[in-house]
């Protein structure tokens, strides 16, 4: 249907003064807001609405094959139906959302329209305030043009938004404005003199001239002062609203803001993917124990997310840039990061890498448990994500991991020795011991260093992807993050930027149902992360993160779209973190042991992919035994080498930032050395001073 915008809200109100009191005066069962069909809204991941059978509609996510109607994934975020067809959500619905209105352009009520009745007194005051707002805007605008005030911003053409929304509220409701809502303040009783005092910044201005003009505010009228930085008022309004709720106040907050606020898998790739996933599991286990033993300071596993790590990495090229979070060592593993490199930083085809992933977990976790490393974080249960995603990429694709993607790095060529070096923080560690364990990185393998703060890697991946686009590179970036990362502002800003700028980036969400101990039901009310991509206008897909073949296929297709169509794509992989969040966590405090064991045995991505590879005649029991044994021996040697290697000297704390170390850092180094001399027993004895 065609939607016509009202050209002059003031003129329309001369003909008929009426108001649709959105949100406050109307309950969800109002005729304006008909009750949704059963299963259409509510808690996360309801399959009736989002994964129903039959023809896909503008509201559906995927088309379900009736043959698979009995296949349901019951994971911590809810129940989701499986589908055999890889189908991406479109970037936007086929039909635009309709626009509600009551008055036509001539101020006449539209036949059949439903609205909140408005009394004569309220209607007259609304119209009067709208006219007053027009006059005030005109005069103050001219005053600025004459140089009598330094700045002014009008709301001409938006008078109905200002006044009508204000009239639908009560004075107990708290307003968090942007800067184009003076009519709300006018309705509440702010006088023209008070407006003038603020714009001229005199002694009668409540802000005493310390704010720019039009930055009004009034505690008396429950109107928070305007803040120039865009969108800062929005989270403030949410926090204040939660306070009203906990205090059982019969009020709400309102905040204003503008529009600105599938493919075949070869034998070689399949074997490499599976191997990387196993390697990732082993590495995570060993490094985790090394951290428990105090041999490295920190480790974080990607257990349960191996398929996400490896399969996503496999779908990229080496030109694609990876922006990891911290649970993506499998991506680095896929790209060629050796176990020695992992060990140096902490301390072979697809199946090969999966095995190595397992060995990393099995051997590094004991290292943490015995205190030989300070921390470890596993990717057990997520090996398919690690290795299969990595296998779908090229080495030109750039990886921005979180912290549970070592399988991606393993796929890319990072050696077990390199993994061990990083976890033990020795001189062979590329970060020279300045990062916590499992914060891998490799410029050689286009794998950006893990960053601990949640979601910071996501906008970095978008920016790097935009750079690849402007340089006309045949590559993309991929960034990994968990379901918890989608609750960060960086996630939303990154998706919006990527969509608008058409950056070739793959957003890979590992939705394992838990943000450490916070379940998805307490994080968001949307149907997981997949619908958020569509909300920002990008193609999106939900996949079984424990199915390496599905991960590989989806990432491969996503990469094709990103590189050849120059568009962002969001992939949500449903998986399960079998291990604890890290060696600092005990997940049995917030989830049952039976649940963990079920996912560890019945839904293990590594054993599932092994059956497929064996079914093709590409793997055997003998190959399994030999690979696990050789990987374990290699990683144990790597750990021994990494543990014996010398620690970086104290001076390395101050290098690699400036060409010439500035005076203030030299002074800090001197002070630190003096402190260590005085308190030698309080500092590690193996760090050269």
Image (spheres, rainbow, N blue to C red):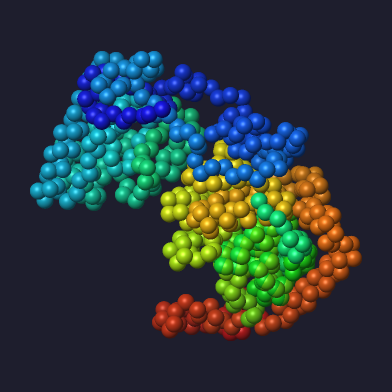
Q: Locate the C terminus and report the quarter of the image it occupies.
A: bottom right
Q: Position of residue 322 (x, y in %)?
A: 57, 63
For residue 249, what is the image quadrant?
A: top left
- Seen from the viewer's position, the closer of residues 555 and 145 is 555
- Seen from the viewer's position, the closer of residues 238 and 178 is 178
For residue 240, what is the image quadrant?
A: top left
Q: Residue at x 55, y 81 (%)?
A: 652
- Seen from the viewer's position, the closer of residues 22 and 315 is 315
Q: Is residue 240 visible?
A: yes
Q: Position of residue 399 (x, y in %)?
A: 58, 63
- Report the side of 564 relative to 554 (left or right): left
Q: Is residue 323 visible?
A: no
- Report the side of 246 relative to 518 (left or right): left
Q: Residue at x 26, y 45 (%)?
A: 215
Q: Residue at x 82, y 50 (%)?
A: 601
- Seen from the viewer's position, the closer of residues 563 and 25 is 563
């Amino acid at each position: 249907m065609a939607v016509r915008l009202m050209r002059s809200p003031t003129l329309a109100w001369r003909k008929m003064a009426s108001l649709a009191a959105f949100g406050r005066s109307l309950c969800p069962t109002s005729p304006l807001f008909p009750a949704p069909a059963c299963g259409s809204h509510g808690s996360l991941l309801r399959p009736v609405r989002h994964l129903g059978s039959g023809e896909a509609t503008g509201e559906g996510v995927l088309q379900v094959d009736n043959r698979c109607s009995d296949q349901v994934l019951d994971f911590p975020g809810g129940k989701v139906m499986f589908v055999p067809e890889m189908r991406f959500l479109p970037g936007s619905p086929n039909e635009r959302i309709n626009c509600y209105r009551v008055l036509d352009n001539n101020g006449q009520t539209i036949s059949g329209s439903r609205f909140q009745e408005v009394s004569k007194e309220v209607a007259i005051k609304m119209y009067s305030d709208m006219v007053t707002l027009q006059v005030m805007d005109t005069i103050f605008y001219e005053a600025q043009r004459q140089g009598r005030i330094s700045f002014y911003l009008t709301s001409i053409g938006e008078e109905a938004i200002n006044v009508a929304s204000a009239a639908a509220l009560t004075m107990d409701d708290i307003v968090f404005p942007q800067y184009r809502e003076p009519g709300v303040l006018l309705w509440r009783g702010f006088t023209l003199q008070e407006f003038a005092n603020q714009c001229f910044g005199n002694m009668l201005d409540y802000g005493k001239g310390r704010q720019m003009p039009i930055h009004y505010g009034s505690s008396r009228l429950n109107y928070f002062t305007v803040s120039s930085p865009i969108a800062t008022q929005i989270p403030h309004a949410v926090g204040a609203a939660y306070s009203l709720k906990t205090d059982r106040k019969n009020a709400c907050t309102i905040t204003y803001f503008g529009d600105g606020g599938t493919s075949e898998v070869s034998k070689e790739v399949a074997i490499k993917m599976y191997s990387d996933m196993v390697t990732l599991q082993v590495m995570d286990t060993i490094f985790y124990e090394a951290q428990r033993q105090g041999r490295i300071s920190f480790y974080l596993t990607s257990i349960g997310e191996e398929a996400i790590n490896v399969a996503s990495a496999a779908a990229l090229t080496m030109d694609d840039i990876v922006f990891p979070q911290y649970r993506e060592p499998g991506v680095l593993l896929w790209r060629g990061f050796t176990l020695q490199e992992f060990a140096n930083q902490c301390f072979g085809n697809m199946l090969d890498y999966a095995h190595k992933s397992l060995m990393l977990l099995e051997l590094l976790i004991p290292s943490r448990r015995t205190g030989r490393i300070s921390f470890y974080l596993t990717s057990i249960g997520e090996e398919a994500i690690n290795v299969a995603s990595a296998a779908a990429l090229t080495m030109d694709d750039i990886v921005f991991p979180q912290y549970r993607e070592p399988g991606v790095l393993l796929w890319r060529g990072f050696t077990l020795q390199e993994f061990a070096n990083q976890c033990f923080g020795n001189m062979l560690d590329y970060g020279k011991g300045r990062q916590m364990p499992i914060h891998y990185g490799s410029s050689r393998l286009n794998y950006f260093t893990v960053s601990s703060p949640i979601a910071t890697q996501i906008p970095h991946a978008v920016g790097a992807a935009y750079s690849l686009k402007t340089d006309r590179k045949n590559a993309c970036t991929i960034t990994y993050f968990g379901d918890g990362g989608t609750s960060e502002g960086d996630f939303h800003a990154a998706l919006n930027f990527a969509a608008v700028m058409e950056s070739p980036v793959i957003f890979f969400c590992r939705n394992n149902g838990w943000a450490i101990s916070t379940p998805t039901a307490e994080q968001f009310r949307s149907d997981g992360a997949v619908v958020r991509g569509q909300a920002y206008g990008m193609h999106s897909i939900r996949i079984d993160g424990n199915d390496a073949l599905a991960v590989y296929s989806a990432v491969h297709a996503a990469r094709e779209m990103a590189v050849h169509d120059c568009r962002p794509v969001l992939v949500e992989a449903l998986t399960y973190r079998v291990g604890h969040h890290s060696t600092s966590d005990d997940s049995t405090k917030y989830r049952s042991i039976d649940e963990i064991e079920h996912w560890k045995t019945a839904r293990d991505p590594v054993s599932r992919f092994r059956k497929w590879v064996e079914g093709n005649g590409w793997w055997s029991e003998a190959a399994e035994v030999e690979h696990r044994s050789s990987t374990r021996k290699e990683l144990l040697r790597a750990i021994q080498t990494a543990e014996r290697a010398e620690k970086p000297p104290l001076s390395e704390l101050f290098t690699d930032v400036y060409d010439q170390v500035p005076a203030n850092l030299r002074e800090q180094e001197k002070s630190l050395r003096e402190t260590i001399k005085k308190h030698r027993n309080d500092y590690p004895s193996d760090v050269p001073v």
